[in-house]
Image: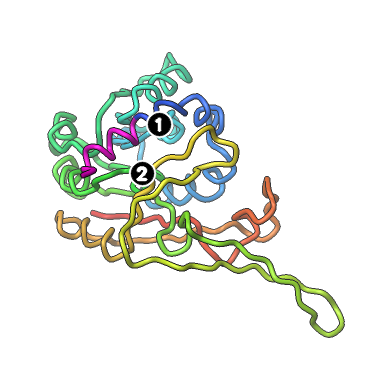
Amino acid sequence: MTTTRDLNNRARQQWDAKASFWDALHGFDGNLFHKTLVGPAAERLLAVRAGERVLDVACGSGQMARRLEALGAQVVATDFSAALIAKAKARTPESKIDYRVVDATDEDALMLLGAASFDAVVCNMALQDIADIEPLFRATKRLLRAGGRFVFTITHPCFNLSSTVFGQERYEVEGKLAYRMSLKQTEYLTPAVHEGIGAVDEPTAHLYFHRPLHVLLNTAFAAGLVMDAVEEPAFPEGTVGGSRLSWTEYTQFPPVLAARLR
């Protein structure tokens, strides 16, 4: 029987294997998806002030950590992939960012970062990649100082699933051709684990852990966190995408969910 630990280990191996691809994809300050949707939403909800101590969980190759440092924060950034942490360090060897290899499913390891020592915690586009989010939510409540906040962005569990089917319809209106975009979903309520691609042409798929909203949020509430803000960013009209039937064309569907917990 496959256990959560087995899945977590498999996920780590997958991310180690494609660390170079992922680092090249996002570069120093992120790709179009992050620059347009993820980064701005996370920054609005975080509202980081200079001098604050911020923990970036599942930091990948360090794009958000670098941005937080530029905003004046004192940054600790963690990921369970040693290969991604190495890529992050290589990007800015002179940086004061404290990069560490820490598994977000290991509550004890997270707590070694320091109870009540962070003004904010951020987890960008990673909860869907984490085999077990309960330890992270429990630890986050203990890691935050009084009044602290936890911001996460995630692939939108209602719209952005591996099973989502993208469609385009052509029709006629008053003698003129028109087009409309649509999404088709065949599943949502049942939590599921599956492999999917995170970007076009990446060398290997990786595990996704789908959680419907009630599972995702109730896990946070059970840990003692409350939600006080949410955003659903979508691409604005006229955004030029890199491929046909990409999220840039679906301006009425948010591929990202961003939330702030306290």
Over which residues does the magenta segment extend?
1-12
Give residue 34's position: percent from left, percent from top: 52, 43
Give residue 100's position: percent from left, percent from top: 28, 24
Give the class, few, some or many, for how many residues have Cα within 10 Å of label 2's Cα (few <14, many ≥20): many
Give residue 220's position: percent from left, percent from top: 22, 56
Give residue 149's position: percent from left, percent from top: 26, 49
The residue indicated by pointer 1 is 15
**Labelled pair 1, 2 in contact (Cβ < 8 Å):** yes
Residue, far right = 175
Residue, far bottom = 174
Res. 119 image quadrant: top left
Amino acid type at mark 2: Asp
Vertical arrangement, residue 63 with respect to residue 86, above or below: below
The residue indicated by pointer 2 is 129
Predominant SS of the magenta segment: helix
Vertical arrangement, residue 153 with respect to residue 108, above or below: below
